[in-house]
Image (tube, helix red, strand yellow):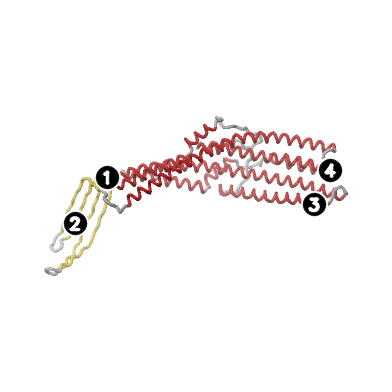
Amino acid sequence: MKRFSPPALLVLAAAVMALGVTPARADNLLDIYHQAQTNDSVWAGARYNYDASIEKGPQGRALLLPSVIFSAGAFKNSIDKTSPTSEMARYDSSSYTLQLTQPLYRRQNFAAYAQGKSAVTQAEAELAIARQDLILRTTQAYFEVLSAEDTLEFARTEKSAIAGQRELAERNFNVGNATIVDVHEARARYDLAVAQEVAADNDLKVKREALTTLTNTPAPSLARLAPRLELQSPEPQDMDHWVNAAQAQNPRIQVQEQQLTIATEEVKRSRGGHYPTLDFIAAHNYSKSGSVFFPGTTEYTANQVGVQLQVPLFAGGATQSQVRESLAREAQARQGLEQTRRETTQQSREAYLAVTSGVAQVRALEQARVSTQKALESTLLGYETGVRTGVDVLNAQRDLYRTQRDLAQARYTYLLSRLRLKNAVGTLSEADIAGLNALLAGG
């Protein structure tokens, strides 16, 4: 019976152990998150949007406060008189006006003020969404790189195992213990393994590029998860609790609630076009003018204090049209809020189930890893006693590594599900990413 040499088996065993090796120098998740905070263009755009949106508050408040206008002018005037006699006059004139206007009753302004306050609250919720989205995108990109590294390592190990099988088939064929069909099958499997390795290597490069786009920094070596991971089920283990918390705290619902408030106030603002306005006005006017046909100048100063009432009578139907438009927008915003509530309920339930099922899956794969490890040890023992072949050893090694890869991916999925559950509830913060970072080797 032909066997692989001990050095070849040791090389393959070393490849199987490579998954647990952690780079000596590696950036951890918190490092990558801080880089993303500094360089991610989506997060930067969200901050600028927040800075712009919160100005709606002062703009709405300004409509309730007094406004002061100063105007001035200086002119050269000419008059030609043709009857009963022809005369021409040239003279200079100047004037200025200082006027204060304090709105006393403008229904539109009250609505605009309320809209400004809601816009500020909405901007704060949108910034919270962007912050939580950055945490999720960073963590997902980080784990996708680690997962792609696992897949590439598996592809390389599988290729090595199949290369050993190909060599065995060729040697057996040369001594007459195998057919040319066996050789062709082994070579075909090896060629397929090479293609899988190329695809895995390309996928890793793509995932690293995605991380580079996020941080605007070449993707470094990344710290990996520590071998031991404490699994935690959601507390409390009550799906309805998490759904209710999401309905109360999810910032996406808060955004839709404020949009509905703004739409409702827009209805009031549109209807305000039918209402009269009342303003307090105080004005100071000064005018100086040369005489038209007589020498000398005319100069006067006038002061005004009082109230001004304006009553809209007809605007060509524009006001009624604006009311109908705003009513439709309000109905649209109400439907948007309802849809967001439903989506939030679905997302919170899915995230809760993902965490609970993730715990079960990780535990099952941990047990599978133990079983495949024992199977490999038994196969190695059988190989030494001559009851198992080198192919059996290679297959057992491949099964162990595949289980290790699937376990690592299940752990990434479980940890991301925990973040998504908190994101659905609206409580995801940097403290959560720091907690994940502590689970990394050297984190």
**Callout in the foreground (1, 3):** 3
For marks 1 and 3, give the CA distance: 93 Å
CA separation in Å, label 2 and label 1 = 28 Å
Residue type indicated by callout 4: Arg
Relative side of 263 to 241, left or right = left
Q: Quadrant of the N terminus?
A: top right
Along the line of sight, which residue is nearer the eye, 131 or 109?
A: 109
Q: Mark 3 or 4 closer to N-term?
A: 4
Looking at the picture, tell me which residue is in the foreground, 91 or 196: 196
Whole-number angstrom distance, CA of label 1 to CA of label 4: 98 Å
For discs 3 and 4, the disc positioned in front in the rendered view: 3
User: Tag 1 or tag 2, which sits nearer the N-term?
Assistant: 1
Q: Which quadrant of the view contains residue 268? A: top left
Amino acid at pointer 2: Lys
Quadrant of the rendered image containing residue 287:
bottom left
Q: Say left or right for 387 vs 58.
A: right
Label 4 neighbour load within 10 Å: few <14, some 14-19, many 20+: some
| Helix, strand or loop under label 4 | loop
Which residue sits at x=17%, y=65%?
Answer: 89
State the mark number for residue 184. Answer: 3
Task: Find numbered disc 2 in the image and state the secondary structure of the residue it sits on.
Answer: strand
Closer to the camera in the image, 379 or 300: 379
Q: Nearer the viewer, mark 2 or mark 1?
A: 1
Picture coordinates of residue 137, whole percent (x, y): 56, 44
Residue highlighted by disc 1: 102
Q: CA distance from mark 3 to mark 4?
A: 20 Å
Eye-nearest disc, 3 or 2: 3
